Image (cartoon, coloured by chain):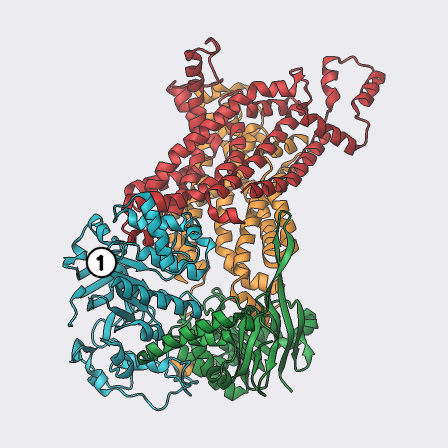
Chain colours: A red, B green, C orange, D cyan
Amino acid sequence: MLKFILRRILIMIPQLFLLSVLIFLLAKAMPGDALTGQLAANPKMDPQTLEEMKEKLGLNDPVHIQYIRWVKNMLHGDLGLSYTHQQPVTDLLAGRVGNTVLLSAAILILTYLIAIPLGIVSGRWTDTWADKLIVGYSYIGYATPLFIFALIMLFIFGFHLGWFPTGGSVDIQVEEGTLAYYLSKLNHLMLPALSGALINTVVTIQYLRSEIIDTKVKDFVKTARAKGVPERHIYWRHILRNSFLPIAAFLGYEITGLIGGSVFLESIYSYPGLGQLFLQSIMQRDYSVVTALVMISGVATLVGTLLSDIILSAVDPRIRIE
Amino acid sequence: MALLNVNHLKVYYPVRGGFFRRVIDHVRAVDDVSFSLNQGETYGLVGESGCGKTTTGRTIIGLIRATAGEVLFEGTDLTKLNRRQFHAYRKDIQMIFQDPYSSLNPRKRVLDIVAEPLRNFEKLSPQEERKKVQYVLERVGLSAESIYKYPHEFSGGQRQRIGIARALTLNPKLIIADEPVSALDVSVQAQVLNFMKDIQQEYGLTYLFISHDLGIIRHMCDRIGIMYRGRLVEEGTSEDIFTNPQHIYTKRLLSAIPNADPRDRSKQAALRREVEEEYAQAYSHYFDENGRAYPLKPISPTHSVAIP
Amino acid sequence: MKLEANGPTAVGTNVEKSPSPLSIMWRELVHDRLALGSLIVLTIILLIVYGASLFLDQEEIVKVDFLAIHSPPSAEHWLGTDYGGRDVFGQLIIGARNSFTIGLAITLITGVIGLIVGLVAGYFGGWVDNIIMRIIDFILVLPFLMLVIVFVAIVPKYNVLTFILIMSAFLWTGKARLIRAKTLAERELDYVSASKTLGTPDWKIILFQILPNLSSIIIVNLTLNLAGNIGIESGLTYLGFGLPESTPSLGTLVSYATNPDVLQNKWWVWLPASLLILVMMLCINFIGQALKRAADARQRLS
Amino acid sequence: MEKQPLLEIDRLRVSFQIDGDYYAAVDDVSLTIGENEVVALVGESGCGKSALALSIMGLHPPEKTKVEGCLQFKGTNLLSLSVSELNRIRGKEIGMVFQDPLTALNPLMTVGRQIEESMDYHLRLSGAEKKKRTIRLLERVGIPEPEKVYHRYPHELSGGMRQRVVIAIAVACEPALLIADEPTTALDVTIQAQIMGLLKELQQQMKTSIILITHDLGVVAEMADRVAVMYAGEIVEWADVDTIFHRPLHPYTRSLLQSIPSAQTKKERLHVIQGIVPPLHKLPRRGCRFQPRISWIGADKHEPDPKLREVEPGHWVRCTCYQHFYFPDDQTVGGVGYGAS
């Protein structure tokens, strides 16, 4: 098991390296560098000083030296300076990351809270009206683009019915740490999280349903019935446990989807998280922030796939041996 | 001279292990196998799953690359040929596959399936091609109008005959039959086996017949090689093997076959017990310290056994 | 019958040909009421969109008219006008045409790349496959949406073609992986071994033996992908990183809804485009799902 | 039968739904299985032997299958029981061994747990007792190092070992009846010999009866006390094993025996049964079902509505055609005469 994880991490290293090279090259290709921030603060800098500063910052060094320095800084938590906000990118992200993590976690939890019961009902009682309803929902959900669904949700529940706030992550009036503060946070979270989850969940429903349908005709289920195991235990111990395998394996890959989804959701619901920051930064050409965000997302995705494989190896004894 | 000589054939697969997945060992799928086939005879390769009999057959026909050794077909070493040179020998060596379902492309009509070798080797007009295909199909007992049908419209036995028709179109000299009837029901098995015997006589075919079923092997083969873990442990005429088995593995295999007469039950059980006892006692006599069988040694002009 | 069939000329005319699997798929599709309905609706939409766009002048539509800002639907402007007084209906038609065409282009490009790469990797295996799979695995773990946005933002001469190329650069991988997996499975079947022993060259085996067996999977996958690509394109355009402004898309109209006032009070600007995207994607998906079921049924038959 | 019947199958009919209509895969089958005997059901694929076995265990999906008739087991009709009542018998009184030992075991559960599971619902045992019994059971089915294997997963065992585990599951509660559905088909011949020996041994030790389902006449010859030969959903011949092999009467039984190559004796030519077993929905429902495959026997030699009749004590044969049956001399092979499509 430990060996498996270690090997899996080993495989990740070249991917991580390639990712960093790609992003570094992108950063180089972006108009503007570490000096752009300084320039913005002090537009009247003469070319002489500019050249000196370039030299000092190592911008005239060969590319690979710059790359190594960039990686080193990153490892020390130095992601550069945001020129629009005039503060270190790390600090800027720290203020936002909580919201995105909260939103993503909420979506993830809701996704499974919806998918598991619906998938089970639909897979166990196929061709009933409940199944047809669930399948219908999953087809429609699969076809609906997230941003359209989120907009319509905002239009109906935010503006039209006024049940939920239409932007932000918390009311400004409430004091931090109070119960009202947390309730307000929850209130702001509900609509984006639900919109994300209702669309995100359908793939899991479809997977779970088809897995259950495949598993319930397997021979080992017949063996269990031949043992006299009652139906509910057959489902729980034999069918569902086996059907959850691919779902568990997908858990990590969900992160990729959540990153993409957060860009849309945070933009539509004006939810102050990393996704929104990413869009703002790219429009304001604040490239040090952009680079940092892409790198973080890339690492998060890699960690997600790693997590997937570890979870799978933990639940499936057949993989442990490999 | 023999039609086919297989000399010291080896097919090894690397086994990777350890933390860096380095090659730590080899699976010896075929481990120094030598035998020869004479024109017009049927040679049986027998053994249990994983013994290397199928790999041997597929290596001879070039589907698997040999690690070492030679496959001499009419004196030419096929393992040394490149693809282009091998092409000339494709006509002479054909194969009948085990699974009549997967060996016929479900998206092709019978005409296209049977004409495939013709299109690779002969330039025929569509008319000639169709005539030839219909002729071969009739030879295997299928009606001429089958040519526009798809494989799924035929039963297992009929599909296997389509496969045989395809192998026959180029008038091959050697046919490698890899478990040709094991996917078929018993009543259909007989049909295909009889048919294979008939065409052998008619065309003077040579068969390499690969099977795990000793009953079928006895019925079909003139000479037999018994394989175990990639090596031949015994070789001889059908008579040698079935009436005078020498190697402990051959004895074990033969004693394991269910006896078709219920009256011989206790006799068979006693024989099995006896062989198992001998197997337990004499194992080290028949296999070296690595569990490998020894090289074959002739004990009569036709009969060889792997003993030290 | 039998006598006739023996004569070479009689064959083929007399014998009823078995339906090809693709025509079976088509028949299944037509028998599925929801899918047939979707097909009809989609055809009508596409006919209207492509037909009408022939008569519409794009220049005329994108011209700003300050006298008619945000006017509600009327006889003159069927779906009202936007903040620049431009006709929403006209933009809807042009946008739908652009979105669909671009979605289709991306689907076809990625389809061709995915097919070639997948077939080659799956059939030949070995180190070729190893290298290709490493590349695919790497691209699959990249944060796709963010990278596309970054590319769109930094590419110097940005136009529709670059957009299509950027999208295709990321989106071929899924298809390549699917085709590779299926090719790998097909390659293990004995009909491929048989073709090899019959002296058929590799390229012929790939094109004429394996490919036909993948056709239904490819069709299903391309159909579902077409819907997905239209969704991604309009989504990116909505965020402002899709089609350049000179080429309006359905996403452009939806993006006006980022203004809360438009979202809340000027429904005619963004809602029709949203619904049109939804309807098109639903139709394509229903067709795709029906094809998927048809492909499965065929497998159960044979 | 002198023995007290353990299971009495009476006019059993099992029908499957195909395109909305029901077709009988097992048609009017009556059989008795006595205490401690081995009854073999033999036939080619599609003859209904597996469908029969699954219906005894109640394992057909109820929404697509119709099971009619009576299955009297120790005085209760199994078909009249609810699922929970049936669960008290399945695993305890009747055990089942499946064909493919790899798919018959849950890949995510340890071997020990899977065997213990069959005790969970039938025996009142503590965890420690169950474990002890399981390890003893593993030992009994011939698994070396049972304490280690107890903690193993199925994929870590060889095919033969897996089949021993499947057998251990089936006999965990010492059932009165064991149904073995092609228990050796997926195994190599040397392993097959071992598994046959094991089943025989367990039958004698536990005083269990076995219903053995197989297409392999060799296995039948070695294992069975009585044999039912099935063709197209019906029993065509039913007698003790010696009679079936030495004095078979029904044309199908005789043809089958003639068509199998034997390792013991060499035949020059194998008998070929013409034609194919028709698919379920194309079975003739009237008259002798084997008639199309022995076309040289005139239609007048068959009964219009063939019944299984006792032609001598304990020997039952269906249809009168057996009285007129002979093997044709010219077994035309090659050419068009070879089995029409």
| Label 1 chain ID | D
Give the farthest residue toward the bottom: D329
Give the farthest residue toward the left: D75
Residue corresponding to mark 1: D66
* Number of numbered discs overlaid on the protein picture: 1
* Rendered location of residue D294, percent (x, y): 29, 82
> Which quadrant holds the N terminus of chain C?
bottom left
Q: Nearer the viewer, residue D261 or A252?
A: D261
Identity of the amino acid at label 1? Answer: Lys
Q: Is residue C89 left or right of residue C128?
A: left
Q: Is residue D116 left or right of residue A79?
A: left
Q: Nearer the viewer, residue C223 or A229?
A: A229
Residue C136 visible in the picture:
yes
* Rendered location of residue C140, percent (x, y): 58, 41
Q: Nearer the viewer, residue A263 or A15?
A: A15
Identify which residue is drawn at 81% across, 21% down: A56
* Rendered location of residue A272, percent (x, y): 53, 20
Secondary structure found at label 1 = strand
Relative to C160, is C110 above or below?
A: below
**Which corner quadrant of the image does residue D274 belong to?**
bottom left
Identify which residue is drawn at 27% across, 65% down: D210
Residue D101 visible in the picture:
no
Identify which residue is drawn at 37% across, 60% down: D141
Q: Nearer the viewer, residue C55 or D190?
A: D190
Identify which residue is drawn at 22% across, 50% down: D88
